[in-house]
Amino acid sequence: MTATVKRTRPPSPWLPTPDEVAAAPAIAITSALGPSLDILIVALTAAHHELQPTADGRPLAVMSSTACAADEVILAAQQLARVMFRYRLAMLDHVASRRA
């Protein structure tokens, strides 16, 4: 005998609803990438202490070449997160307009 279980989703700014994925399947992969980008940014910042702000809030004057590269990756990840968020909003708007 199989019990029917009501599935609830944990709160997450990245997690789409089943209806959103059904209407626009590409939202699923962009939603999966969001938390990965967040983790990437935290990991790179932790690995390169030069990327963390100083007590006065200013960046260090000298950074290693690996920290500079990590900083570029962080900036690209932040940009990608913003673009994916705009894409998701556009897709949801498109789906809503088709239903109206």
Image: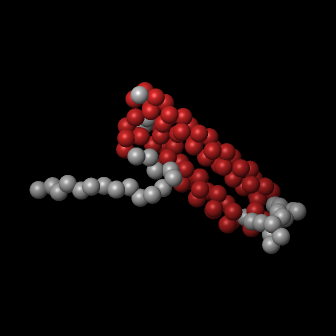
- Counting from the top left corner in percent of width and height, residue 22 is at 37, 37
Give the number of marks. 0
Residue 6 located left or right of residue 39: left
In the displayed structure, would residue 100 be above or below residue 13? above
**Residue at coordinates 50% horizontally, 50% vertically from top-left?**
14
| One can see residue 71 in this view | yes
In the displayed structure, would residue 93 be above or below residue 13? above
- Counting from the top left corner in percent of width and height, residue 28 is at 45, 43
**Residue at coordinates 66% horizontally, 49% vertically from top-left?**
78
**Residue at coordinates 88% horizontally, 62% vertically from top-left?**
61
Residue extending farthest to the left is: 1
- Counting from the top left corner in percent of width and height, residue 33 is at 53, 48
Residue 73 located left or right of residue 58: left
- For the N terminus, the image quarter is bottom left
- For the C terminus, the image quarter is top left
Residue 92 located left or right of residue 78: left
| One can see residue 73 in this view | no
Residue extending farthest to the right is: 61
Image coloring type: secondary structure
**Residue at coordinates 30% horizontally, 55% vertically from top-left?**
7
Q: Say which of 39 and 93 sits in front.
A: 93
Q: Say which of 15 and 70 sits in front.
A: 15
In the displayed structure, would residue 89 be above or below residue 2? above
Q: Say which of 12 and 30 sits in front.
A: 12
Q: Quadrant of residue 95?
A: top left
Q: Say which of 100 and 17 sits in front.
A: 100
Residue extending farthest to the bottom is: 55
